[in-house]
Amino acid sequence: MDCIIFIVEKRFKYIALYYDTLMKEIDYKAWVEYVLKIFKKKNKNPKIIIDLGCGTGNPTIILAKKGFKIYAVDSSKEMIEVLRKKIEKEKIRGIIPVVGDMRNFKIKEKVDAAVSFFDTINYILTKQDLLKCYKNVRGCLNEEGVFAFDINTVYGLEKVWGTNVFIREFGNIFSVWKSVWNHKKMVSTLYLTLFIKEKNGYRRVDEVHQEKAFTLSEHESILRKAGFKKIDFFHHLTFTPPLEISTRVMVVAEK
């Protein structure tokens, strides 16, 4: 069996081509509709939006097809390249792909809203960097702007992810997901290994991902320090307060 082994430090470099297959069970349409309901609840009517950590752009494309102008920001040029190909193939208008870091990306104009899907914010591992991110997002927003994003909670990373091994098969991809929880650092480390079936055997791809679990009070404190005035937390996909066993929470911060 022929195998090429990639040991990578940069996340989403080699799995970019397979990301959509790995995430095919995610109902992105429902997540986008939820965000639109949040805008309506907050009496916001955005026209221009940042999608922060857009990845391969599944929510981005849904938003663009609804008529929004979207700045699609991601630090992985490989994920952005997948998005560019989708834009070209489907002839989608209104998306401006941007390769940039959440902490210091730049765009050419102010926007009405910022969104971030699928626990992108958990990839920020320190309070200092989280503050940089929140300040940067706030600086991109127009007055009355809003930032809506979901996070994996402490409960989610500690009790659900925990220290476990999951095996999943997606068509020609066999995947191993090994998560290790570090309670002292409040960090979950995911060792992701893919075996992609090819003509002469399998090709192996390895990546390591880390997510940090900040408490909701820590997020609120840092958001306020960044200049956001009103912060709400919702159990994901609802408008009810988070529960102690909420694995994912939606954060809505208003400028």
Image: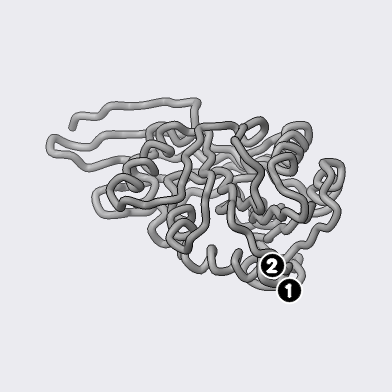
Q: Residues within 10 Å of mark 1 (few under 14, many from 20)?
A: few
Where residue 180 appears, x then y in whole percent? Answer: 59, 42
Nearer to me, 155 or 254: 254
Q: Residue 92: x and y, percent? A: 37, 52
* Three-letter amino acid code at the position of disc 2: His
Q: Is residue 246 left or right of residue 32?
A: right
Q: Of the residues shown, which amino acid type is indicated by label 1?
A: Thr
Left/right placement of residue 19 relative to residue 181 reads left
Examine the image and state in which quarter residue 176 appears. top left
**Residue beneath label 1, please?**
240
Q: Are marks 1 and 2 in contact (CB under 8 Å)?
A: yes
Q: Position of residue 41 (x, y in %)?
A: 71, 72
Check the image and report above or below for 1 versus 244.
above
At 66% from the left edge and 67% from the top edge, which residue is drawn? 38
- Report the coloring of the rendering: one colour
Give the mark, 1 or 2, whose residue is nearer the N terminus. 2
Between 96 and 12, the residue placed more toward the observer is: 96
Residue drawn 74% across and 67% down? 242
Q: Is residue 99 above or below residue 153?
A: above
Q: Considering only vertical position in the picture, is 42 above or below 213?
A: below
What is the CA distance from the residue labelled 1 to the residue labelled 2? 6 Å
Q: Residues within 10 Å of mark 2 (few under 14, many from 20)?
A: some
Question: Looking at this view, is 228 or 189 the one in front?
Answer: 228
- The reply, left or right, for residue 149 in relation to residue 62 is right
Q: Which residue is mark 2?
A: 235
